[in-house]
Structures are given as structure tokens and as C-alpha cells.
């Protein structure tokens, strides 16, 4: 184990010559002492887990505080150590990071799903303050998934499903592609073991010919670049098992009929040479129409940049080529971890804010969606969505799920814009509100102060933000109408009892009757009456009796 701790310290010092290596070693020693005698399901000492997590964090080039949090992240949950101990010994920064990844304690929940939702809410709040929280949590999840074979089957499936639905998509949103790919493949292995095993065996059977093909194409690409005097590194890789499996399902084809399972990468020294390399690739092989994507001019929200093209390569087989600079490659591998400024708790520039727009959206959902099941379903759906990139009239980019409509776009701008949307222009032309947006569209929303959301909109909007805002408006309006209906029903009953409605609606006797039924205010009671949950006659009878007792025979004549 000392070899690994020494390796971690070497990486930390390489990333930052002033890294506090003594602090890192103290965190390791604390974890070793606290986890003494504990074993994992594999029979190994528990310490191998925090050690593995800290190693992943170091390899993400995170700082000493993050590495310490990797060592300490299970101490509060699994040992007698407290957050106060962590704060006293390692300082408030590391205490906050450990708290962010520590699950809620022994608070009772009605179900495992409710507990999962509330733990995720807690992590979201910590994440919004410091993105390192989720990076530590992802490192924890990667290490746990790598050793999942030793866990009971039922627990394997639960952890793997959560990984596929939550953590792999978050890794993708953060732009950490190697982590996304590994988590997806490991989840595939445990959730669909038969399909995974079958694909694994088939891929192993063609590995030698695939390696030879990759080597030949890489050499040809290098020759083309060298002949043009273009500095470049060329590599090829087989795509992940999960992505190949998904392609087989989408197309209904067997592995033998899937051709573009290999991707090639060209790394050069400048943006200008990226486009020059693209020209050389297209002049060497025939490009496939509609398969070129320029993520350099229009980066993904997670900061990813590259040129993507598909060409008809040797043997008339399709092959995908990605072209990027070294800086773009570092961002593609490490994502937001390559950009985050730890000394500044706020988001930095415009690109950082765009990269974290999805996190702000999750924060809004956790405020708006009180039902744990609805909250987790919303999170899972929206983290997974394929996206289109569209423009405001001012040229700002908005990322929306594929199939999104002008209504979704309007709510992405502002709730008021969505609520009052009457129409939209796309690229200067009027389109229906249910029109599906495409990447590159420029959208202008037309509004009217008299317009309000329609229930029909829920049939075609795609974003959870739009759905939540529309449902909220409808709920508020229905509540307003129910209050009015309830008050009218109560007024009619009071008249029937010969009492003045206006005075009775303001009376203490009605408020007492409301509280007896479990409602804090008369408006809450009126809402329940309007919805038919409580009978107006019953309430009027109770309030009237209390009024009669109070007035001791003095009658209140109805107006």
C-alpha cells in the first residue's frame, strides 16, 4: 500500500509543486487507523477502497484537499469518526468535501427510493457550492464498480442501475469521457450479464484482425499528415461495449453487420491545423454526407471540442475520425476537472457557466419537485437526453433535448416568456408551437401579456423545466378557482342557515372549524371544499353551531 500512497503523492506534487504532501499522508494514516480490522466483500482490507479512490482523484489532477477527501470519505459513515473530527484535524474545506459525499444518517425514510432521492438532493446542494464533491463521489463510484463482482447479486443490480441512470450521465455532463465509458461498460456487465458475455466473446474473437486494421489505418493517416508537413499524433480504438450494444439494438443488426465500431483520433498543434487535417482526411477517403460535426466552432456544454467526420475507409468500411488539439484532448479526457478553479467557489467565465447550466437546472428541480419519486425520474430522464444546440436572436447558444419545441425554448429563456408564448419564428419563419427544433436553428419567441399556459402543451413539450412550470401554473390556477368555488358554496350554506356570508367567512368560528378539519386557514378550507374533499354543508353546520353558542340566542340576519 505504501507504493500507492507514494505514487499518489508523486502525482500531487507533479500537479502542484506546493501540494501539502504531509496533509495527504496524515489523511491516509487517519483512514488506516479508523478502518483497521474492517474488510470488504472480497475479503481485502477495507483500506484498499479509500486508497483506490484517492488514486483516481489524483489521476484526475485534483488538489490535495480532494485527495484527502478520497481517503476520508467513508470514515463518517463506516467508523466512529465524526465530521467534527474531520474538521478539527483537517480543516473546514476537507470537512465540507467529506460531508458532501456522506449519505444522510439514520433518518427514517418511507422507502429506499426516498432515501436515494434525499441523498442525491444533499449531494446536489454540496455540488453547487463545490464541484469537487461530485468528482470525489464519481471516483468512489468507479472504484466500487471495479470491485462489484464480490457483492451479492441483488446489490450488484441496484448499484449498477444507479450507476447507469445517474453517475455515468453525470460523468458525461462533466466531460470526463473515460469515466463515463468505464461506468457504462461496468453497469452493462452487471445489468445484462448474458448480452455482455456474448458481445465480449465475439469481440475477443475478432480482436487480432481489428488490431491489424487499426495499425494499418493509423500508419496511412500518419503518412498523409507527414507528407503534408502537418504535426500529428494518430491513434485508433475500438468503441465501448455499451455503445456497440446500443448501436446493435437501434439498428436491429448483429455485430458482424455493425461497421463503424472503430474510431480514429488525430491530435495536432492548432485549431488551424485541425481543419487542415480534416481536409486531408476528406481528400484521402470519401466523407459520408451528414456525418460531419464541428464541435470546435460550437463546443458541447461540457466544454468538449473536436471535429467529427465519418468516411468510407479501407475495405469500403465506414470509420469515424476525431480531430482535436492537445488542449482539447485534455479537456475531452478530464472534462471540467481540467478547467475548474478551486480557489474561486463561484463559476468562472461564460463557458464554465454554460458547462454547469445542467447543474443549475437540477438545483431548480430539487426546489420545485417535492415528491422524491418524481424528482429522481426527472433527474434520470434529463441527464440522459440527446441534445440539440439552438441560438437566441442575440447568438447565445441553448442546449435542449432532442425533440424540444419552441415552448421548451421559451421556458429555457424565462418562466414569463414561456407562460406568455403565443408563437415562434425559426430562422425568420413562423412555425407551430409543437415544431421540433434542430441544431443550428435561430429562434425568436412571440409573446402576449394575455396568453397563459395550456394543458395541451404538456402533450408535446420535452424538457422537465417546461413541464414543471406548466403544471405549477395549472395547479395555482386550479387552486384559485377552487378557493372561489369553495367560498361560493360556503356562502350558500350560510345563507341557508340565515347567517350573513361575508361576516361568517371572516369569523373565528369558521377558522376554528377549518382547523378542526386539519386546515390552517379559511382559504385552505375553501380550496378543499372547492375540490370536493370537504362538504360545505358540514362546515357550515359546525361554524353555525359555534356562532349560535357564542351569541347565545342573538341571531345574525343574512345579508
Image (spheres, rainbow, N blue to C red):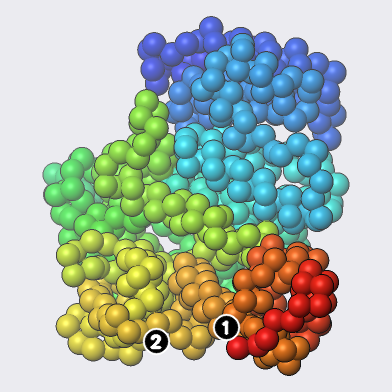
Along the viewing direction, whichever of 370 and 161 lies nearer the viewer: 370
Tell me residue 246's x, y (percent).
57, 68
Q: Is residue 492 left or right of residue 331?
A: right
Per the model, the C-alpha gap separating discs 2 and 1 is 33 Å
The quarter holding residue 232 reads top left
How busy is the neighbourhood of tag 2: few (under 14 within 10 Å), some, or many (20 plus)?
some
The quarter holding residue 536 reads bottom right
Name of the residue lying farthest toward the top: 22
Q: Residue at x 25, y 71 (%)?
A: 440
Q: What label does residue 484 carry, if any?
A: 1
Tell me residue 168's x, y (percent).
57, 52
Along the viewing direction, whichever of 427 and 4 lies nearer the viewer: 427
Q: Is residue 230 left or right of residue 512?
A: left
Q: Is residue 89 above or below residue 79?
A: above
Q: Quadrant of the N terminus?
A: top right
Q: Which residue was labeled with disc 2? A: 434
Along the viewing direction, whichever of 312 and 95 lies nearer the viewer: 95
Amino acid at each position: 500500500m505504501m507504493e500507492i500512497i507514494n505514487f499518489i503523492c508523486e502525482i500531487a506534487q507533479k500537479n502542484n509543486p506546493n501540494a501539502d504532501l504531509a496533509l495527504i499522508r496524515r489523511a491516509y494514516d487517519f483512514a488506516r487507523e479508523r478502518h483497521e480490522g474492517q474488510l470488504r466483500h472480497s475479503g481485502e482490507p477495507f483500506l484498499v477502497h479509500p486508497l483506490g479512490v484517492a488514486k483516481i482523484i489524483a489521476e484526475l489532477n485534483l488538489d490535495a484537499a480532494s485527495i484527502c477527501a478520497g481517503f476520508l470519505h467513508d470514515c463518517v459513515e463506516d467508523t466512529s469518526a465524526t465530521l467534527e473530527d474531520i474538521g478539527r484535524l483537517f480543516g473546514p474545506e476537507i470537512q465540507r468535501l467529506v460531508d458532501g459525499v456522506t449519505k444522510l444518517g439514520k433518518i427514517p425514510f418511507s422507502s429506499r427510493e426516498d432515501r436515494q432521492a434525499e441523498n442525491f438532493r444533499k449531494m446536489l446542494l454540496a455540488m453547487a457550492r463545490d464541484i469537487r464533491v461530485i468528482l470525489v463521489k464519481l471516483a468512489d463510484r468507479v472504484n466500487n464498480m471495479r470491485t462489484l463482482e464480490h457483492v451479492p447479486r441483488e446489490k450488484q443490480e441496484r448499484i449498477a442501475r444507479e450507476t447507469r441512470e445517474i453517475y455515468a450521465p453525470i460523468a458525461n455532463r462533466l466531460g470526463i469521457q473515460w469515466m463515463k465509458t468505464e461506468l457504462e461498460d461496468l453497469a452493462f456487465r452487471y445489468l445484462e450479464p448474458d448480452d455482455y458475455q456474448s458481445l465480449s466473446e465475439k469481440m475477443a474473437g475478432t480482436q487480432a484482425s481489428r488490431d491489424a486494421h487499426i495499425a494499418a489505418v493509423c500508419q496511412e493517416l500518419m503518412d498523409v499528415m507527414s507528407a503534408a508537413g502537418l504535426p500529428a499524433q494518430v491513434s485508433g480504438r475500438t468503441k465501448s461495449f455499451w455503445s456497440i450494444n446500443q448501436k446493435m439494438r437501434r439498428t436491429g443488426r448483429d455485430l458482424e453487420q455493425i461497421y463503424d465500431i472503430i474510431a480514429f483520433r488525430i491530435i495536432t498543434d492548432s485549431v488551424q491545423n485541425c481543419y487542415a487535417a480534416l481536409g486531408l482526411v476528406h481528400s484521402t477517403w470519401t466523407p459520408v454526407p451528414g456525418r460531419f460535426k464541428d464541435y470546435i466552432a460550437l463546443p458541447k456544454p461540457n466544454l468538449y471540442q473536436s471535429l467529427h467526420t465519418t468516411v468510407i475507409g479501407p475495405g469500403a468500411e465506414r470509420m469515424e475520425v476525431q480531430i482535436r488539439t492537445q488542449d482539447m484532448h485534455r479537456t475531452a479526457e478530464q472534462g471540467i476537472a481540467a478547467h475548474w478553479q478551486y480557489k474561486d467557489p463561484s463559476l468562472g467565465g461564460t463557458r464554465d457557466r454554460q458547462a454547469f447550466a445542467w447543474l443549475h437546472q437540477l438545483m431548480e428541480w430539487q426546489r420545485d419537485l417535492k415528491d422524491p419519486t418524481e424528482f429522481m425520474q426527472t433527474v434520470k430522464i434529463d441527464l440522459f437526453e440527446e441534445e440539440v444546440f439552438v441560438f437566441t436572436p442575440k447568438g447565445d447558444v441553448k442546449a435542449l433535448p432532442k425533440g424540444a419545441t419552441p415552448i421548451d425554448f421559451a421556458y429555457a429563456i424565462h418562466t414569463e416568456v414561456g407562460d406568455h408564448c403565443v408563437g415562434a419564428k425559426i430562422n425568420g419563419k413562423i412555425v407551430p408551437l409543437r415544431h421540433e427544433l434542430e441544431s443550428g436553428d435561430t429562434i425568436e419567441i412571440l409573446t402576449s401579456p394575455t396568453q397563459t399556459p395550456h394543458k395541451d402543451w404538456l402533450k408535446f413539450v420535452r424538457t422537465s423545466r417546461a413541464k414543471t412550470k406548466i403544471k405549477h401554473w395549472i395547479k395555482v390556477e386550479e387552486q384559485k378557482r377552487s378557493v372561489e368555488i369553495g367560498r361560493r358554496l360556503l356562502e350558500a350554506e350560510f345563507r341557508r342557515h340565515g347567517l350573513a356570508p361575508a361576516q361568517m367567512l371572516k369569523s373565528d368560528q369558521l377558522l376554528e372549524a377549518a382547523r378542526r378539519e386539519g386546515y390552517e386557514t379559511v382559504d385552505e378550507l375553501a380550496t378543499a371544499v372547492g375540490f370536493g374533499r370537504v362538504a360545505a354543508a358540514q362546515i357550515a353546520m359546525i361554524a353555525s353551531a359555534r356562532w349560535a353558542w357564542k351569541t347565545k340566542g342573538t341571531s345574525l340576519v343574512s345579508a
